[in-house]
Image (spheres, grey):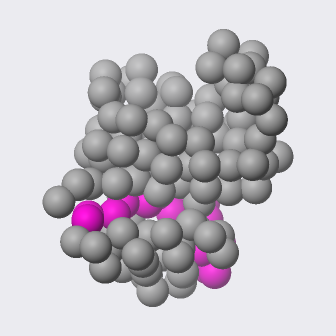
Amino acid sequence: MSTIGIIGMGGMGHRVAAELNAGGHRVLTCLAGRSDLSKMRAAHAGEHDVDTLEALVGEAEIILSIMPPEDAASVAAKISAAFKTTGSDAYYVDCNAISPQTSQDIDAGNE
């Protein structure tokens, strides 16, 4: 069993979480500051809520970012800071529909 963190409990994120849970994985998310709808979706998907992004990054082996493309860069910057704080060696997977240039900018810290 892997521990997988999912950032984004929208229409797609909570469905991915449900499938991963059904496959026997432990799935984490951070719902701090999220809407009641996101919290309901996460509960339905069987996600484990952690208090901070640092806790999610520190516990997860793989982190999936699943959100609207316009939010991908700002969230990647927050996750990057959490990686630096925790020293995590988790894999970060950007599952967002972003351009190759945006991916390169995120990698270079130019978001």
Q: What residue is at 28 percent from the left and 73 percent from the top?
A: 23
Instruction: Locate residue 24: give its quadrant.
Output: bottom left
Q: Is residue 84 magenta?
A: no
Decide if residue 2 is on the left or right side of residue 85: left
Decide if residue 15 is on the left or right side of residue 47: right
* Residue 85 can be seen in this image: yes
The residue range painted magenta reads 25-39
* Residue 33: image location, x then y, percent: 60, 60
* Residue 55 can be seen in this image: no
Instruction: Locate residue 94: give its quadrant.
Output: top right
Q: What residue is at 53 percent from the left and 73 percent from the top?
A: 14
Vertical arrangement, residue 96 with respect to residue 9, above or below:
above
* Residue 45: image location, x then y, percent: 43, 80
- Quarter containing the C terminus: top right
Vertical arrangement, residue 47 with respect to residue 94, above or below:
below
Q: What residue is at 30 percent from the left and 27 percent from the top?
A: 89
Q: What residue is at 56 percent from the left and 66 percent from the top?
A: 13
- Quarter containing the N terminus: bottom left
Decide if residue 51 is on the left or right side of residue 69: left
Q: Is residue 27 magenta?
A: yes
Q: Which residue lies most toward the front here?
A: 100
Vertical arrangement, residue 8 with respect to residue 24, above or below:
above
* Residue 5: image location, x then y, percent: 40, 53
